[in-house]
Image (cartoon, rainbow, N blue to C red):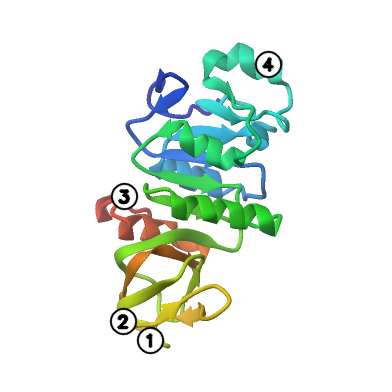
Amino acid sequence: DEAYGAQTPIMTDKILQFKKGVTLLGGGPWTEAQLPSALAHAPYLVCADGGANGLKTPPDAIIGDLDSLENQSKWRDELGERLIQISDQDSTDFEKCLAHIEAPFIVGVGFLGARQDHGLAAMHAVIADRRPIVLLGEADLAFAGRGALSIHLPIGARFSIFPLRAMTTTDGAGLKWPLDGLAMEAGSQIGTSNEVSGPNVTIGFDQPGASVLIDPDHLDAALHALRLVSTDDLTE
């Protein structure tokens, strides 16, 4: 049986406290390779509501309004108070999880690639949250651009920026189409389908609001760029 996490998380007033990164599993599509890849860096597994459906081994916790969760009595027997039901309808299950998790960083799996409104809602929550959060989907890896970013990607790799708020890029380098000093805003100017042209992409963001999207094969590079892992932690 597969075991998640290193030890039982500390729970205080329905807030789960983790000393290491958390893999947050949603109910959207994900591949067999994505979950172990995420858990290699974020070893705790928390499920957002129906993200637990189909799991054979209990996760470290389940959080949500539980309207999509199958076998609730089974999970309650196995998890006890770590099955956290939040009944309000003013937030998504992803936002409920973020509000009840304290962790250094989060890798979200199963939040991109299905319904577009779900994916947009998840990215909205990532930008609103101050912690490093990476969303890993079948076709995209997404995170919020904040401050200065330096990321190593293969020449020719895709590098897209989609603004959810008005913001301006600074100090851009390493891209086929330069983005230095470009004011971006949804409905006006975006920066999608760019290509890596140098050994490192460097770019700054004057304020939060940008979604950075790259290919999902580059999880290690993204985590390293966000200073969540060292080069010694990267997989081959």
Along the polypeptide, which appears first: circle 2 or circle 1? Answer: 2
Q: Is residue 99 above or below residue 130?
A: above
Q: Which mark is residue 89?
A: none
Neighbor class of circle 3 (other Cα within 10 Å; few <14, some 14-19, many 20+) is some
Q: Is residue 128 above or below residue 165?
A: above
Instruction: Kindly identify which residue carries mark 1.
Output: 178
**Residue plotted at (48% across, 66% down):** 165
How far apart are the alpha carbons under marks 3 and 1?
Answer: 27 Å
How far apart are the alpha carbons under marks 1 and 4?
Answer: 54 Å
Kindly state the secondary structure of the residue where label 1 is placed: loop
Instruction: Kindly identify which residue carries mark 3.
Output: 228
Neighbor class of circle 2 (other Cα within 10 Å; few <14, some 14-19, many 20+) is many
Which amino acid type is marked by label 3? Leu
Give 45 or 171, whichever is nearer the viewer.
Answer: 171
Along the polypeptide, which appears first: circle 2 or circle 3? Answer: 2
How far apart are the alpha carbons under marks 3 and 4?
Answer: 35 Å
